[in-house]
């Protein structure tokens, strides 16, 4: 514990840690706006999934291992390593000469991101007593909310060739922008963060780390873009996707079983099984998993809804989430302050998750005929509920364990929420695809699709019989490009014939857009209902938690533990 440090030093440390965390949170959103430009430049559409999955894979695997190592070697060393890796990998990602180099450095970047994520929330417990942590957990939650807005805006601005420091930006700047922030954070952490010393000699559980890496890595690959990532293997061997997933699921089960076996016998387990004897820990991990899945279900597809229904650009669709982010930031910061004053957190989790559950279900009433004002009202209330729950989960799990277990406990919460998000995105993506396939059955006979079927320009978007391609064709920018191409093709026609052709095209495009938006909306309603059910189960678990009041600082007692 470093509760004795001067407040000035604590504030500098927290500022540098928040800057590091902001880097990680920002990277998850800023890259999304640059992906299409990247694959265009490298002509690597088949590698698009790997650019995202490589980062997700290494981050997921790194978080629990980094949490344990920070308990053994101290938070400062791990944070410096994480920030250093993240900054260096960001630079190399920007300098990548081909897509394979970019994927490699994205994977390395994910290792740094996982280390930062595992330690950023934990270091609050090193610097502040349990009673004081609420306000800082709330601020960290606000950092994630802010990055959700800044990321798409900054990514779009940098990708669109603007001037910065006398230089013309491009997609590479979405990585370069991380470097100066990483350097500043590294210097501040090195200067002001104390080195936490440990009495016992650390013993690293290498076997457990390998087994956990295999289990988590295989799980992520089994649910995230599996068909695209292993397309070459499936084509070469003739294996079906279902068989591949069964094989991968078997690997996950075997590796997990061996991991549990090893954890029972090693001196310093990566994830101590005694944690699962703690009732509140088990409940919070369940809440984190369900919350992660439901949160992604409610957030991920709202931007697509805004693009498909309101015709918003990717940047504008991000701005349209401002009401949700505003609600999230306000309640995250405010609830943290109140929790620190009262020493009680359960009531905030209860109110927050009930409000979030109701609002996620209310989102299922959104249709193409809904107004943005109605959506904005729902988003404000949903954000208000989410903003209370997200930071308090870390606070609650930290309050269950002694100081030397803080890293493992906190990173476990991050891990289970990440796994919930990963599986949730995969399941909801499958639901969306199935819903669209059902809603757009027979779309091959659609006049608009027939018009486009022989167009070479359109073929770059993919197979016209697949749902994701149809959604891409209904995106505002894509429709503008296709319309411009069509207008160019009919320039030589006589005026009257050209006008009739243009009118037929416009009518066909409008009818196609109506079909797609309604099929998408119908599918999204099912996703929101499933998300609401998951949130409801999580809410039941919240009410089962037995609260232990948060303690104020005491020189004789480890905060949050007996």
Image (tube, helix red, strand yellow):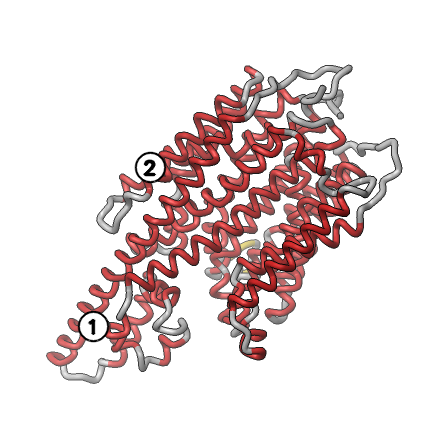
In screen coordinates, is 202 left or right of 299?
right
Residue under label 1, please give it: 505
Q: Secondary structure at mark 2?
A: helix
User: Which tag, 2 or 1, sits closer to the chain's start?
Assistant: 2
Q: Secondary structure at mark 1?
A: helix
Coordinates of residue 402 in the picture (x, y in percent): 73, 26
Coordinates of residue 487 in the picture (x, y in percent): 25, 75
Coordinates of residue 467 in the picture (x, y in percent): 36, 65
Label 1 neighbourhood size at 10 Å, few (<14), some (14-19), many (20+)?
some
Label 2 neighbourhood size at 10 Å, few (<14), some (14-19), many (20+)?
many
Residue 222 vs residue 318, the one in the foreground: 222
48 versus 264 height, above or below: below
Residue under label 2, please give it: 378
Residue 75 vs residue 232, the one in the foreground: 232
- Foreground mark, 2 or 1, reads 2
Residue 334 seen in render: no
Q: Residue at x 45, y 43 (%)?
A: 294
Dividing the image into 4 quarters, which one contains the C terminus? top right
Q: Residue at x 14, y 83 (%)?
A: 494
- Say which mark, if any, is on residue 206: none
In screen coordinates, is 375 left or right of 222?
left
């Amino acid at each position: 514990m470093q509760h004795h440090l001067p407040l000035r030093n604590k504030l500098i440390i927290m500022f540098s840690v928040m800057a590091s965390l902001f880097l990680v949170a920002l990277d998850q959103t800023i890259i999304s706006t640059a992906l299409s430009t990247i694959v265009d430049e490298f002509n690597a559409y088949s590698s698009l999934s790997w650019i995202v999955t490589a980062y997700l894979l290494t981050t997921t695997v790194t978080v629990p291992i980094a949490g344990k190592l920070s308990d053994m070697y101290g938070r400062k060393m791990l944070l410096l390593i994480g920030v250093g890796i993240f900054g260096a990998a960001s630079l190399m990602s920007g300098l990548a000469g081909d897509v394979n180099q970019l994927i490699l450095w994205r994977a390395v970047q994910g290792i740094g991101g996982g280390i930062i994520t595992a330690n950023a929330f934990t270091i609050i417990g090193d610097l502040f007593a349990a009673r004081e942590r609420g306000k800082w957990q709330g601020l960290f939650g606000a950092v994630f909310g802010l990055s959700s807005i800044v990321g798409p805006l900054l990514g779009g601005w940098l990708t669109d060739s603007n001037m910065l420091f006398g230089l013309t930006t491009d997609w590479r700047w979405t990585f370069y922008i991380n470097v100066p922030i990483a350097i500043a954070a590294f210097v501040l952490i090195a200067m002001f963060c104390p080195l936490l010393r440990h009495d016992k000699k650390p013993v690293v559980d290498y076997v457990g780390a390998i087994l956990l890496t295999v289990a988590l890595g295989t799980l992520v690959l089994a649910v995230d873009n599996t068909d695209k990532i292993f397309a070459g293997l499936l084509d070469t061997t003739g294996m079906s996707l279902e068989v591949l997933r069964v094989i991968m699921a078997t690997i996950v089960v075997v590796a997990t079983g061996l991991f549990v076996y090893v954890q029972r016998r090693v001196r310093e387990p990566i994830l101590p099984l005694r944690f699962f004897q703690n009732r509140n820990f088990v409940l919070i991990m369940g809440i984190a998993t369900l919350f992660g899945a439901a949160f992604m279900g409610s957030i991920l597809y709202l931007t697509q809804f805004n693009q498909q229904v309101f015709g918003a650009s990717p940047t504008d669709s991000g701005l349209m989430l401002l009401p949700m982010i505003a609600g999230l930031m306000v309640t995250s910061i405010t609830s943290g302050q109140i929790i620190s004053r009262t020493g009680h957190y359960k009531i905030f989790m209860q109110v927050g998750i009930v409000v979030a559950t109701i609002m996620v279900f209310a989102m299922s009433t959104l249709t193409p005929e809904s107004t943005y004002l109605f959506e904005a009202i729902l988003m404000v209330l949903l954000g208000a509920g989410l903003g209370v729950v997200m930071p308090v989960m870390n606070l609650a799990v930290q309050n269950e364990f002694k100081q030397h277990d803080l890293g493992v406990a906190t990173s476990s919460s991050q891990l289970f929420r990440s796994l919930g998000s990963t599986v949730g995105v995969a399941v909801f993506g499958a639901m969306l695809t199935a819903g669209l396939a059902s809603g757009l059955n027979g779309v091959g006979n659609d006049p608009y699709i027939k018009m486009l079927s022989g167009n070479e320009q359109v073929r770059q978007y993919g197979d016209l019989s697949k749902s994701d391609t149809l959604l891409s064709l209904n995106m505002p920018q894509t429709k503008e490009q296709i319309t411009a191409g069509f207008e160019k093709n009919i320039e030589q026609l006589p005026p009257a014939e050209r006008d009739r052709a243009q009118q037929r095209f416009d009518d066909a495009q409008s009818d196609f857009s109506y079909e797609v938006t309604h099929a998408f909306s119908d599918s999204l309603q099912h996703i929101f209902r499933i998300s609401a059910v998951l949130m409801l189960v999580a809410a039941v678990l919240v009410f089962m938690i037995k609260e232990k009041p948060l303690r104020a600082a005491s020189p004789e007692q480890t905060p949050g533990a007996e």
